[in-house]
Amino acid sequence: MGSTEQKLEGPDFSEGVELDSLREGVPLLGHVGDDAAILVRTKDDVHAIGANCTHYGGPLAQGLVVGHTVRCPLHHACFDLKSGAVLGGPALNPVACYEVQRDGSRVRVSGLLPEGALTKRRPTDPGISPDSIVIVGAGPAGAVCAETLRRESYGKDIVLIGAEDPGPIDRPNLSKDYLAGSAPEEWMPLRSADFYEQQSIQFHPNDEVKSIDATAQSVTLASGKKISYGALVLATGAEPIRLPIEGANLPHVHVLRTIGDSRAIIEASKKSKRAIVIGASFIGLEAAAALRSRGLDVTIVGPESVPLARVLGDEVGAFVKKIHEDQGERFELGRKPTKITERAVVLDDGRELPCELVVMGVGVRPRVELAQQAGVQIDRGVLVDARFRTSNPHIYAIGDVARFPWPRTDAAERVRIEHFSVAERHGRAVALALIGRSLEMRDVPFFWSMHHDVTISYVGHAEKFDRVVVAGKLDERRAVVAYFDGDSVRAIATINRDDASLRAERAFETDDQAALRALLS
């Protein structure tokens, strides 16, 4: 994975610092020998952990301290200051945790603590925990569920089943740096087969589930193997849509969901000069930027008049459009493709756009076929309760396939959110629910989208909005954007305002509308 690791700076904590120099809740950047670290004073203690997020190396010294946690400013991973443990994705690995000693008016870091030394986990209750857990889908939700179960001392059989090699991958990078050629392949896997073997997780990376027998509580794999379960977790995700037009399945027409898809587009780009991206979606625009960075002539086709306006509003959508145009990409908006030939995309006005490569980024649909086969309730996704249980008490659903209750929507409404970080946090939440440690799911949806050298961070969830307020200047690439539904802020987007993005996340968690509005001042 990429990294923005800092050079060593600040005091050497092994030599000690004055306690009075530490402001409560404000990380102090320093180091322990050759390792960057932060020192954080909370109400009742002082903690020392590694300075860099284990996701993309984000600077935790610039993060937000909430209680005994710190959140990364880049992608909102959350770490326990007491132990270094991951409490919220997209990070998977803990940060280093150090022992802190007080010596009069000074505090000193005396050494590295073993991983998990301060994390007290009670054994799982055999009367609550299922006899075995089968997880269908090795994306971020399923992967995090499996390893959280082991981390939380679940000692029975865990089976993780994936449809394709190599297993869990850094999916957001498929349309970003990996597709652009600036992230090597070795960054992409989230975990190795060796990791699962060490954790005693039975991993089937290329043998998908073909059928579920909910009465017998078993699944049958494509290989014919039958596996029984005490609890079944459906993390089947979503699949990309191909438009039902002539030529949609030609060899040079691609969708983008798996690492195999991304590899195929990369190979095709080496033999192409012109690419058409159908769909001015986040995936479509990111893919367009990646192909443009590879030197291709890129045109984006979409039915809307302003890209991303449905999610980000007209003003921000126009800003994103200009970013891409400034890099030489062209737009054909208000248009739909009617046919794809071996050499062109034909538009609904009869024009033909020549190309050798086509990428469709027109959305995804939840993979609900197995859930339907199991007889659980479906409505634009798999319906689940606050503990991610379906209408069958032995079957759970998480990630892109699940429609779940979120406290900030109408009481009767459930949402389905297709964000990588949300899927990971679902995985952790359902693992805790399965072993009787259920916590209220108050994690706030978050995603980030890259458009050449501009990253947009989005916190919250606005199913609809009737007013958009921009604070700052989009053309200077520094702004906070609030999405209102009536008098309530439903979501916040930021550009080069990671501090505001973190504060927005916290404000949504506590339903603090005043704090959300204050971000606009």
Image (cartoon, rainbow, N blue to C red):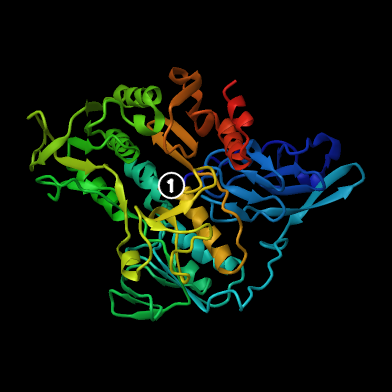
Residue 168 location in percent, x, y? 41, 59
Q: So how many labels did they put on this image?
A: 1
Residue 32, placed above or below residue 499: below
Question: Quarter-wise, where is residue 42 in the image?
Answer: top right
The residue under label 1 is which amino acid type? His
Left or right: 144, with 215 as reference point: right
Q: Nearer the viewer, residue 48 or 33?
A: 48
Q: Is residue 383 left or right of residue 496?
A: left
Residues packed near mark 1 inside 10 Å, few (<14), some (14 to 19) or many (20 plus): some
Q: Note whether 253 is above or below 478 in the view shown.
A: below
Q: Is residue 106 left or right of residue 188?
A: right
Residue at image location 45% in from the left, 37% down from the top: 462
Answer yes or no: is residue 311 visible. yes
Q: Which of 233 and 296 lies nearest the eye of the viewer?
A: 233
Indicate whether 412 appears above or below 156.
Answer: above
Is any part of residue 182 visible from this angle? no
**Image quadrant of residue 65?**
top right
What residue sits right under mark 1 in the picture? 419
